[in-house]
Amino acid sequence: MIVDVHSHLFRHSHDFTDPFKSDSARAHAGEVDLTVKWEEYAATAPEGTRTIVVGGKARRSGLWVDDAAVASYAGAHPDRLIGYLSLDPTQPGWQDELRYGHQELGLRGIKLMPMYAGFDPAAEEYDELYGYAERHGLPLLVHTGTTFVSNAPLEWAMPRHLDAVAIRHPELRMVLAHLGHPFEGECIAVIRKHPHVYADVSALHYRPFQLWHSLRLVQDYGVFDKLMFGSDYPFTTVDDSVKGLREIARIPGIPGLPPLDVDAVEEIIHRPSLDLLGLNG
């Protein structure tokens, strides 16, 4: 079974401001239609794929997906989808949104976008959020790495900031998105030292040299077991992501260095991520 730990619910006309939509053209090779359609997602993923779906909240960058929409979408396909709530802790009322999304809507994790929302994820003022998630077993999916949004401060996307969070909250499950690209070295340093901190490989296969280089670093540091599969749909699909990973694994590599471990790459695709994140109950 494949577990996709990183997919989205976007309703293109509802959830973005115009600057966010136009900036998204920088994601890869032109503007992407970000409208999510279940039928399209299901048709481009193997039968039985289990999927974590998130919205997103970042007032600064012009993105705001209502948690109730995510709960409704996930609830329509309960055998396939697991919904996360999203928080922008720079905005008033986030504590109420956290409790409502978890306790009333039944959402099972939290998506944070520090760079898009413009906050330091390591700041102790957010320990109330992290402590709640740790106590209630809500894993975090945290955007790390670069972005296409002009107004999002790159500093708050650096993976190193999550090190301080993991030190203060050692039982908190976290997934650092996109292997922190192009700051993979930082991301690897963080996931290597914390038993409950992982990274996903979503939205990387269409930059093949970068992904090959990233996986070589992962192999050198011995942290293949800390990588989880993700697609980042609608930016790409499960099928294309699987195909891209397998193609990268077959590249001979640099003469004089060992090639990528093909079996280890295959294990990413079939990682039991729901077990590792405590979401299989």
Image (tube, rainbow, N blue to C red):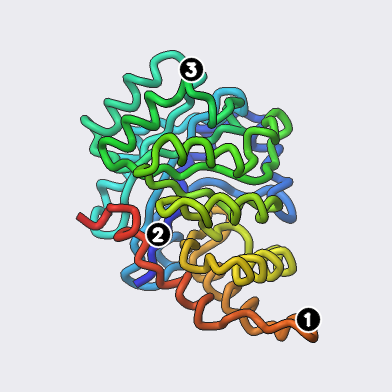
Image quadrant in which you'd find residue 152: top right
Picture residue at 58% right of the left edge, 81% below the top? 261
Q: Is 97 in front, or is 10?
A: 97
Residue tagged 3: 91
Identify whether 83 is placed above or below 113.
below
| Mark 3 nearby-residue class (10 Å; few <14, some 14–19, many ≥20) | few
Q: Which amino acid type corresponds to the residue marked 1 in the rendered image?
A: Ile
Residue tagged 2: 39
> How far is mark 1 from mark 3, CA to CA?
48 Å
Residue tagged 1: 254
Extreme-top residue of the structure: 92
Quarter the C terminus occupies: bottom left
| Mark 2 nearby-residue class (10 Å; few <14, some 14–19, many ≥20) | few
Q: Is 251 in front, or is 104?
A: 251
In contact (CB < 8 Å): disc 1 and disc 3:
no
Identify whether 66 is placed above or below 255.
above
Image quadrant in which you'd find residue 136: top left
Quarter the N terminus occupies: bottom left
What is the number of callouts on the image?
3
Comes first in the chain, label 2 or label 3: 2
Q: Which amino acid type corresponds to the residue marked 3 in the rendered image?
A: Gln
Comes first in the chain, label 1 or label 3: 3
Picture residue at 39% right of the left edge, 42% below the top? 170
Q: Position of residue 133 (x, y in %)?
A: 33, 35
> How far is mark 2 from mark 3, CA to CA?
34 Å
Q: Position of residue 82 (x, y in %)?
A: 31, 50
Q: Which amino acid type corresponds to the residue marked 2 in the rendered image?
A: Glu
Comes first in the chain, label 1 or label 2: 2
> How far is mark 1 from mark 2, CA to CA?
41 Å
Query: Which mark is on residue 111?
Result: none
